[in-house]
Image (cartoon, rainbow, N blue to C red):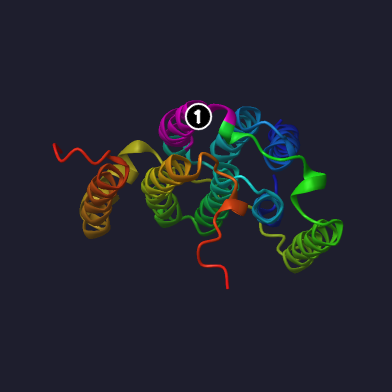
């Protein structure tokens, strides 16, 4: 059952990742990425990370990518991607496919040896919460500060020059 | 059970496809989307490493990566909106002010 779920979700993840990088319309490409997030969430559950699977779906797929979708739809017609043939000369496309394929092949070749099976381990909410507030307190506070600075930067970048804000 | 190398190879394939997306896409928003795909592949690697070693440290690292990705998407989209306001297009071929 675990084996069947792993192969099913990895096939879904790879096919929707292909949709992300190849689909001409940006909204469809983003919806393909959301499908990839769902497949990855199931894989996180198989790896014993229930909290992270749900955080992935709620925060990443449900907030960050929806924000992305808002911006794509606000840009409207300007957000379309040019067809592949007129984007780059053919030699660039072939060369990048060769580089990408060589990269994936090299990674698969390097990683083929490890036959260790995974230990049974559950990253429950209690365990992660305890660690975040005791052992990893400083990085936790720092990324809270990072989010605050991100909000300041986004507002100050994107506001219109009316001097009110 | 699935050996951990299968998870790492899947993460490598997703990372490579994100890399291909960055190389093949010309729209700035879709390049950012491919960066998100690469970040997710890295998250999968971190969580597989956490399951391999029996620690929760990899999962906490993946949590931090998700938060950083959210902050980066915010600022990246602000930049894309600024580009659209200036040039009425988010195609990266219109960014040529620094072209030598």
Residue at 77% of width from left, 60% of height from top?
A96
Q: Which residue is mark 1?
A: A69
Relative image position of residue A66 (x, y in whole percent): 46, 28
Range of residues picked out in magenta: A53-77
Extreme residue in the bottom direction:
B100
Label 1 resides on the chain identified as: A
Helix, strand or loop for disc 1? helix
Q: Quadrant of the N terminus of chain B?
A: top right
Relative image position of residue B29 (x, y in whole percent): 55, 42
Left or right relative to B83: residue A10 = right
Relative image position of residue A78 (x, y in whole percent): 57, 34
Indicate yes or no whether the magenta region holds residue A98: no
Instruction: Name the image quarter holding residue A163.
Output: top left
Is residue B73 placed above or below A75 in the rendered structure?
Answer: below
Left or right relative to A47: residue A113 = right
Residue B65 versus residue A147: which sits nearer the camera? A147
Residue A40 versus residue B6: which sits nearer the camera? A40
Residue A17 versus residue A13: which sits nearer the camera? A17
Asked if one can make out residue A42 in the rendered structure from this viewpoint, the answer is no
Asked if one can make out residue A13 in the rendered structure from this viewpoint, the answer is yes
Instruction: Name the image quarter holding residue A64.
Output: top left
Residue at 27% of width from left, 39% of height from top?
A159
Left or right relative to A16: residue A118 = left
Residue A79 versus residue A163: which sits nearer the camera? A163
Q: Quadrant of the C terminus of chain B?
A: bottom right
Is residue A42 placed above or below B73 in the rendered structure?
Answer: above
Extreme residue in the left direction:
A164
Relative image position of residue A67 (x, y in whole percent): 43, 31
Left or right relative to A49: residue A139 = left
Is residue B97 placed above or below A61 in the rendered structure?
Answer: below
Could you tell me what secondary structure mostly forms the magenta stretch? helix
> Tag 1: Cα neighbours inside 10 Å, few (<14), some, or many (≥20)?
some
């Amino acid at each position: 059952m675990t084996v069947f779920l792993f192969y099913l979700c990895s096939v879904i993840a790879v096919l929707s990742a292909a949709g992300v990088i190849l689909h001409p319309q940006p909204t469809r490409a983003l919806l393909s990425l959301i499908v990839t997030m769902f497949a990855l969430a199931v894989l996180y559950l198989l790896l014993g990370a229930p909290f992270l699977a749900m955080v992935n779906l709620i925060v990443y797929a449900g907030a960050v990518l929806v924000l992305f979708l808002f911006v794509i739809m606000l840009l409207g017609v300007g957000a379309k991607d040019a067809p592949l043939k007129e984007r780059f000369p053919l030699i660039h496309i072939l060369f990048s496919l060769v580089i990408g394929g060589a990269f994936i092949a090299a990674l698969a070749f390097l990683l083929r040896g490890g036959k260790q099976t995974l230990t049974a381990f559950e990253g429950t909410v209690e365990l992660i919460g305890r660690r975040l507030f005791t052992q990893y307190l400083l990085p936790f506070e720092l990324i809270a500060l990072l989010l605050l600075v991100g909000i300041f930067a986004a507002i100050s970048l994107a506001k219109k020059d009316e001097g009110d804000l | 059970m699935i050996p951990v190398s299968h998870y790492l190879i899947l993460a490598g394939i997703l990372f490579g496809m994100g890399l291909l997306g960055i190389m093949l896409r010309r729209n700035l928003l879709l390049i950012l989307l491919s960066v998100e795909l690469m970040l997710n592949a890295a998250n999968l690697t971190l969580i597989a490493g956490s399951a391999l070693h029996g620690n929760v440290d990899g999962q906490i690292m993946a949590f931090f990566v998700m938060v950083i990705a959210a902050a980066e998407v915010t600022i990246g989209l602000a930049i894309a909106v600024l580009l659209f306001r200036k040039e009425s297009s988010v195609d990266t071929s219109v960014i040529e002010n620094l072209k030598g």
